[in-house]
Image (tube, grey):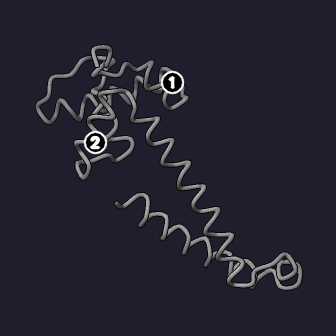
Amino acid sequence: MANYQYMMSADDVARELNCSKSHAYKLVKSMNKELASQGYITMAGRIPRVYWAKKMYGYESYHRGQYIKLLLEGKLNDHLHEVDGECYERMELLMEQMKAEAGITEELKTSDQMKWVGLMNNVRSSAEEIVLDELIYV
């Protein structure tokens, strides 16, 4: 925990967003203006990591303890990447099962594309809802 940096530089922002440094400086400057208007002391070219996460990714206080722990240990991105992978794996599995139950086949795709697209959209929406309930909104 001793190596954790509470502030992000514009270079860190540029790396995280894969954008130019000048664009990153504009983002940091804009966020610093918001913080200053709320009465916080700011540093040119730097932004608090917690504020960055809140503004860019919408992280709030529902699981604040776990979020802060992961953030301070520098493990937040790894955790989010792991959850994202789990979600995609679960989506693929659910979609395959639902396709089999609904009788969605490649044959249907070639014979009636509109019906196939409609059924696939329903399957995807149902699978997304299940994954969100099981893995995200817990």
User: In the rendered view, would you say 92 is above or below 116?
Assistant: above
Q: Position of residue 63 (x, y in %)?
A: 26, 49
Residue 64 lies left or right of residue 111; in this view the side is left
In front here: 6 or 76? 76
Residue located beneath label 1 in the image: 15
The C terminus sits in image quarter = bottom left
In front here: 46 or 57? 57
Residues at marks 1 and 2, CA–CA distance in whole angstroms: 25 Å
Q: Residue at x 31, y 19 (%)?
A: 4
**Mark found first going from the N terminus, 1 or 2:** 1
Q: Position of residue 127 (x, y in %)?
A: 56, 70
In front here: 101 or 119? 101
Q: Position of residue 17 (x, y in %)?
A: 50, 32
Residue located beneath label 2 in the image: 66
Task: Characterize the local packing of mark 2: few (<14), some (14-19) or many (20 or more) Cα atoms within 10 angstroms.
Answer: few
Residue 16 lies left or right of residue 29; in this view the side is right
User: In the rendered view, would you say 68 is above or below 41?
Assistant: below
Q: Which mark is residue 95?
A: none
Q: Residue at x 53, y 55 (%)?
A: 87
Q: Secondary structure at mark 1?
A: helix
User: Which amino acid is tagged 2?
Assistant: Gln
Q: Secondary structure at mark 2?
A: helix
In front here: 22 or 119? 119
User: Which amino acid is tagged 1?
Assistant: Arg
Q: Residue at x 54, y 28 (%)?
A: 19
Residue 132 lies left or right of residue 88; in this view the side is left
Q: Quadrant of residue 132?
A: bottom left
Most extreme residue toward the top is 3
Q: Position of residue 40 (x, y in %)?
A: 14, 28
